[in-house]
Image (cartoon, helix red, strand yellow):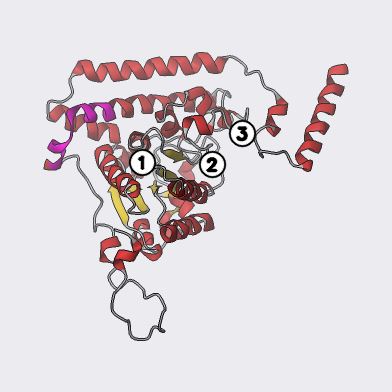
Amino acid sequence: MTVLDHRPTAPVPGWLPGATAPRTDPAPLLPDHSPVRILGTPGLAAYDPALLRELYRRLVVGRRYNQQATTLTKQGRLAVYPSSTGQEACEVAAAAVLAEDDWLFPSYRDTLAVVGRGVDPLQALTLLRGNAHTGYDPVATRTAPLCTPLATQAPHAVGLAHAARLRGEPVVALAMMGDGGTSEGDFHEALNFAAVLNAPVVFLVQNNGYAISVPLTQQSAAPTLAHKAVGYGMPGRLVDGNDVVAVHAVLTEAVDRARSGGGPTLVEALTYRVEAHTNADDATRYRQSAEVTAWQQHDPILLMERELRGAGLLDDAQAAAAVAEGEELAARMRAEFHAEPVLDPASLFAHVYAEPTPQLREQAEQLAAELAAEAEK
């Protein structure tokens, strides 16, 4: 259903002749009163057991990836790491629902989703290591560079999705951001353009409770962030962000809707950032340990494993295999990060513009001169 489907056919009193009347019924766009959940409900039986086991495997391996990346940061191998521990269900589902030709637009916390798209873990962490603007080819991987400024990737996702639709390509863009990103102007501009253009784009907001140290209650007075969708003319969906099956189902529906011409969707996933904002943050200054402990009882891996074992869909051997795969990944990360990277400073200027600007050429020449002078000493 598109924006046009909701326009009234009869004249609306008070509107000038020829003016476009507003929607008369926002109900189809409103999110559910409570988050969508599938784990712990009879609805779980409708899902393919192979898919459920695959989602579980990705959760377990993803948790080990987060743990190892955090350790590398403590060792000085990474400059900074925004962990997605506790949010792995959102990361895993976002990568899993996209087709090969679709595009992912991640934020700085979404390295796990980037790895889920098939990007090598070392390349996914290149930016956070401080070695380059990005470590992978965005076009080849259909994955935009990790976005450090809040929500600036959202308008880019809309532009790409709209351009693909104009070319007749069945491409969907999925833009990921945190609750803090919804306070940025780029977020609002992106939603407005997406709805007006009916662009095939999905916005996934991982509401982990805090924008660094600022709780959601000090950012927004809306009933939920998903309600913001109504003001722009798109559906809002609210989902339990630690229920990987529910996130996968809601995102699949949104992606399918976008691909079929139904337009954009805003999905708010309620989750929790178990670790600090980054290694530079002291989370004890703004939240209590009891809060963290309570959320750990709603851990996405714990929820999924309990359900699968209860349904007879996961045994000890399958669980151990996922753990072993995670350990293998962690060992490879340690080995590869132990080696010092060979860097070419000139590459900083290689992929900024298709045609370098005079300023970039001047800066590149200046750097080359400085490096040559250093080499002569």
Amino acid type, residue under disc 2 in the picture: Cys
| Contact, mark 3 vs mark 2 (Cβ under 8 Å) | no
SS for tag 1?
A: helix
**265 or 44, which is in the foreground?**
265
Q: Which residue is drawn at the image coordinates 74% and 42% (left, top)?
A: 357
The quadrant of the picture occupied by the N terminus is bottom left
Residue to which mark 1 is pinned: 292
Relative to 277, is 375 on the left or the right?
A: right
Residue to which mark 3 is pinned: 133
Relative to 279, is 273 on the left or the right?
A: left
Q: Which residue is drawn at the image coordinates 32% and 60% (left, top)?
A: 2
Q: How far, Cα to Cα, is label 3 from label 1?
A: 33 Å
Q: Earlier in the sequence, mark 1 or mark 2?
A: 2
Residue to which mark 2 is pinned: 147
Amino acid type, residue under disc 3 in the picture: His
Q: Earlier in the sequence, mark 3 or mark 1?
A: 3
